[in-house]
């Protein structure tokens, strides 16, 4: 044996030893774990790289014990394909853990961003809030409500575009006949009055209230109702008008007033919100709503490439049509995303070339890439940079993998043309605001201040018009088959025992004798047209304009209090309003060193916990509490949050069957 051959053998043996003796898992399925980026309720969240596409993803790890809870999240999340919703690529089930591979948002949570910036200028607020509302419109149109919208569940991608995540409390709703729900869920400070009161509520209206809280936090730098004492927070949510500083211009103030209307019946619909002058005056129109688009050409290309490397196309089509979130579906989404990005770069280059010397003919819609971003994209699509990004810095199996990758990426086979270039869908809205408020005057002082802030904000501004290349399933026949039809939606709705009712008009509801429709007991003036507390109200947090989420006297209003929430335990009295205080210590300025959720013994003492192993129990910061329901949860679901607790009551949701099929054990290196 030659000397260098022996050296190679010895090196590969050492690699093998290093790999199998390393106590830390580094490969999960086809992902290589790089680092830990956070801690969720059920486990660590890792930054990982997809070995075939080099795409960065997050891997959310959970114990198999949480499988039933996760099923709800996966069931909703995998159907959602929108530029402002994090994409769920794949679910990897290994012996005792489940990993969810999701779109990575390198700029973290909106919570941290707002904390860093203290307050956002109106232009930035408008851009982010527009994206958020577009995502919510899509969600509601899909017959789904989020029910846990908060700054911590909104992420920012590399272009500082909004991505909603965490669908743990989502549920199906009938978008044509608003469904009444009774499960109290979400985070207290973001909860609508009707939810706090334990009344039946309409999920869409509760989401819209939470949007109001988020918009308020962006503009004012703190939450409108957030006290140390949860009961006080709840009382304020029900009775008080939020204090609105003078610095907020009339137009956003008008929108905020409408969103935070105590009576859900008078809150605007998502279409009405999107048509509000606050958006229109900033150049955001319903005609510029983005949808996820991919071309037939890109799909064909990806299919052929997968076929070339031996993937069974029938199997692939099944995975796609059932949105199975398995290995093949993950490959499909990631490859398609890459291909679409490539196409978008090409079209940006095309725009760039055609705009030279003729800039007036080059129209950039509000949410499409700016020229600056497009230039960057073109530069990075240079063949050399491509090569660089494809190079594999990996394990001993690198050679095989790179051969496989070269088959996937360097296929010379010709593909049928027929590209549908990315375009913007127009969504028509019938309702218009009757009264247009004054044009929004940009507050130059605020903008100046913000422009001098940290690099994050500069990046945000510079990427104002950037566009993410995202996969679209809607042009794909296979995908189309998989999209739940209205029928399947209503079938799912039927599984929920809360009977959907028509929301014809507030008047018709008033006539109803149902408790859920009784007017909310707040002062009459605020019932219909809530006026924000006067800015002259000096008792209420002076100088709050300058206070940040983490600095403000709600000082206590650091993250710990933000995440106080209803929990997935019901009290012994089914109608009592029970709240749980997460006693996670204040973590200071936008950091989260400790896990959110502390052991059960540190909870608010008025909670009565049914028997069970408290040491095993963790409070989900945003868990569920059912009030006023006499239903009992089936035994299988009762272990959702607390072992041995039969009091937990959850709404019936269609459950995804989680197989423990060994074929899913792609890589159990631990
Ligand atoms: N898509 C993502 N991109 C980047 N970081 C992420 C992403 N998802 C989660 N993280 C990081 O992981 C942390 C925990 O994730 P997340 O909040 O989604 O977990 P969770 O289990 O839903 O927690 P909770 O229920 O308490 O909200 C986040 O604070 C964030 O730092």
Image (cartoon, rainbow, N blue to C red):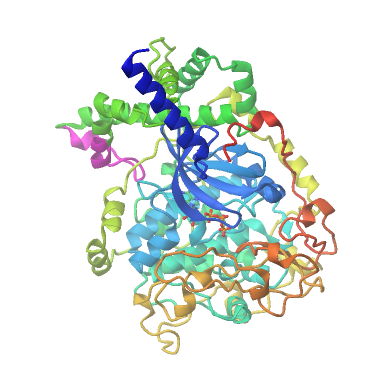
In the drawing, does residue 74 fall left or right of residue 458?
A: right
| Magenta-drawn stretch contains 132 | no
Classify residue 635 as left or right of residue 206: right
Q: Which residues are magenta?
A: 358-376
Instruction: Decide: is 134 above or below 244.
Output: above
Quarter of the figure with residue 482: top right
Residue 510, position as x, y percentages in the image: 74, 68
- Of residue 98 and residue 4, the one placed in the foreground of this image is 4
- Tell me what residue is drawn at x 46 percent, y 64 percent: 593
Q: Position of residue 240 (x, y in %)?
A: 56, 80
Q: In the rendered structure, does residue 369 fall within the stretch colored magenta?
A: yes
Q: Height in image: 210 above or below 60? A: below
Between 134 and 3, the one lying in front of the other is: 3
Relative side of 122 to 184, left or right: left
Q: Residue at point 39% right, 76% down?
A: 551
Q: Position of residue 562 (x, y in %)?
A: 52, 69
């Amino acid at each position: 044996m030659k000397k260098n051959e022996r050296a190679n053998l010895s090196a590969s043996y050492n690699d093998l030893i290093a790999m199998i003796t390393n106590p830390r898992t580094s490969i999960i399925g086809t992902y290589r774990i790089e680092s830990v980026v956070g801690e969720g309720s059920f486990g660590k969240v890792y930054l990982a790289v997809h070995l075939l596409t080099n795409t960065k993803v997050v891997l959310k790890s959970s114990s198999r014990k949480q499988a039933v809870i996760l099923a709800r999240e996966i069931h909703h999340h995998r159907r959602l394909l929108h530029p402002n919703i994090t994409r769920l690529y794949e679910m990897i089930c290994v012996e005792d853990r489940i990993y969810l591979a999701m779109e990575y948002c390198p700029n973290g949570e909106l919570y941290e961003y707002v904390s860093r910036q203290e307050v956002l200028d109106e232009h930035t607020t408008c851009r982010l809030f527009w994206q958020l509302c577009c995502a919510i419109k899509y969600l509601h149109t899909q017959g789904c409500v989020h029910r846990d919208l908060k700054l911590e569940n909104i992420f920012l991608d590399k272009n500082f575009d909004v991505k909603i995540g965490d669908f743990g409390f989502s549920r199906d709703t009938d978008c044509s006949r608003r469904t009444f729900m009774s499960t109290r869920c979400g985070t207290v400070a973001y909860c609508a009055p009707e939810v706090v009161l334990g009344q039946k509520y309409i999920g869409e209206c509760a989401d819209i209230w939470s949007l109001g809280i988020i918009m308020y936090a962006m503009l004012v730098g703190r939450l409108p109702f957030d006290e140390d004492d949860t009961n006080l927070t709840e009382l304020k949510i029900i009775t008080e008008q939020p204090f609105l500083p003078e610095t907020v211009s009339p137009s956003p103030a008008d929108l905020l007033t409408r969103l935070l209307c105590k009576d859900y019946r008078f809150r605007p619909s998502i279409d009405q919100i999107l048509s509000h002058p606050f958006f229109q005056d900033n150049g955001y129109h319903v005609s510029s709503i983005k949808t996820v688009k991919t071309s037939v050409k890109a799909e064909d290309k990806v299919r052929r490439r997968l076929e070339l490397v031996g993937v069974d196309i029938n199997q692939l089509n099944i995975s796609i049509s059932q949105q199975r979130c398995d290995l093949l579906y993950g490959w499909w989404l990631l490859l398609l995303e890459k291909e679409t990005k490539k196409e978008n770069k090409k079209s940006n280059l095309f725009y760039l070339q055609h705009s030279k010397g003729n800039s007036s003919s080059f129209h950039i819609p509000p949410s499409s890439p700016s020229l600056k971003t497009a230039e960057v994209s073109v530069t990075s699509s240079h063949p050399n940079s491509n090569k660089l990004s494809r190079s594999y810095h990996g394990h001993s199996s690198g050679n095989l993998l790179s051969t496989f990758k070269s088959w996937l990426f360097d296929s010379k086979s010709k593909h049928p043309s027929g590209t549908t270039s990315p375009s913007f869908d127009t969504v028509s809205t019938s309702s218009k605001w009757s009264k247009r408020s004054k044009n929004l005057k940009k507050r130059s002082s605020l903008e100046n201040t913000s422009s001098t802030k940290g690099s994050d904000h500069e990046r945000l501004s510079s990427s104002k018009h950037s566009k993410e290349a995202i996969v679209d399933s809607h042009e794909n026949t296979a995908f189309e088959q998989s999209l739940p039809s209205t029928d399947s939606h209503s079938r799912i709705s039927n599984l929920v025992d809360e009977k959907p009712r028509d929301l014809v008009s507030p008047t018709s509801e008033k006539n109803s004798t149902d408790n859920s429709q009784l007017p909310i007991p707040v002062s009459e003036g605020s019932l219909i047209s809530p006026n924000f507390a006067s800015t002259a109200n000096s008792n209420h947090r002076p100088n709050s304009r300058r206070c940040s989420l983490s600095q403000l006297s709600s000082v206590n209003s650091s993250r710990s209090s933000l995440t106080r929430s209803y929990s997935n335990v019901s009290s012994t009295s089914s109608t009592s309003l029970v709240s749980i205080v997460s006693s996670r210590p204040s973590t200071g300025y936008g950091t989260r060193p400790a896990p959110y959720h502390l052991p059960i013994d540190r909870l608010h003492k008025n909670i009565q916990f049914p028997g069970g192993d408290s040491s095993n129990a963790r409070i989900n910061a945003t868990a569920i509490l059912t009030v006023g329901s006499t239903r009992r949860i089936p035994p299988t679901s009762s272990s959702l949050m607390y072992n041995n607790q039969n009091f937990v009551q959850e709404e019936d949701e269609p459950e995804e069957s989680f197989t423990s099929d060994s074929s899913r054990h792609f890589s159990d290196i631990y």
